[in-house]
């Protein structure tokens, strides 16, 4: 049986009676496990990137924030410097992305997803 103790700094120290080959093997074994673990982590990061956390564009989020406050399309357009038709377009896009059918549903879905406070 191989006896290896660890110093306070984490370096292995072997008794003098242990053969050098056993010492080298005992040190390489944890090093090999660490190398394998690091190699596995490198290959796992090569996977396809995850879906973005926020599927909405910044402008869609701005429009939804105003809608959540109870603003009409005309109010949102005035506040954001857009045309009312553009506001409707952003709303439709956000509804499609979040699977909602009404203004209330899209605001609730955005809040549940953590996209709105």
Image: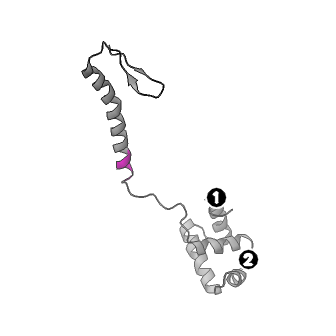
Q: Which residue is depicted at the point 60% across and 75% down? A: 59
Task: Using the rendered view, name the quadrant where residue 68 is placed.
Answer: bottom right
Circles 1 and 2, Cβ within 8 Å, touching? The answer is no
- Residue 117 appears left or right of 42: right
Question: Considering the image in quadrants, where does the N terminus appear?
Answer: top left
Q: Earlier in the sequence, mark 1 or mark 2?
A: 2
Residue 82: x and y in percent read 64, 85
The residue that mark 1 highlights is 112
Question: Considering the image in quadrants, where does the C terminus appear?
Answer: bottom right
- Residue 16 appears left or right of 106: left
Question: Callout 2: helix, strand or loop?
Answer: loop
Q: Nearer the viewer, residue 38 or 43?
A: 38
Q: Which residue is depicted at the point 47% across and 60% down? A: 51
Q: Nearer the viewer, residue 85 or 55?
A: 55
Tell me the chief SS of the magenta region.
helix
Residue occupying the far front of the picture: 16
Neighbours of disc 2 within 10 Å: few (<14), some (14-19), many (20+): some
The dot on residue 71 is 2
Residue 9: x and y in percent read 47, 28
Q: Which residue is depicted at the point 55% across and 71% down? A: 57
Task: Using the rendered view, name the quadrant where residue 5 is placed.
Answer: top left
Residue occupying the far right of the picture: 70
Residue 114: x and y in percent read 63, 59
Chain part drawn in magenta: 41-45
């Amino acid at each position: 049986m191989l006896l290896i103790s660890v110093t306070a700094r984490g370096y292995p120290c072997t008794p003098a009676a242990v053969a050098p080959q056993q010492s080298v093997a005992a040190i390489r074994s944890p090093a090999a496990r660490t190398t394998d673990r690091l190699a596995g982590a490198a290959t796992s990061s090569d996977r396809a990137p995850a879906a973005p956390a926020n599927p909405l564009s910044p402008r869609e989020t701005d429009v939804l924030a105003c809608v959540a406050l109870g603003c009409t399309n005309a109010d949102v357009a005035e506040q954001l410097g857009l045309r009312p038709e553009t506001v409707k377009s952003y709303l439709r896009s956000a509804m499609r992305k979040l699977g909602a059918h009404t203004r209330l549903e899209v605001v609730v879905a955005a809040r549940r997803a953590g996209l709105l406070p």
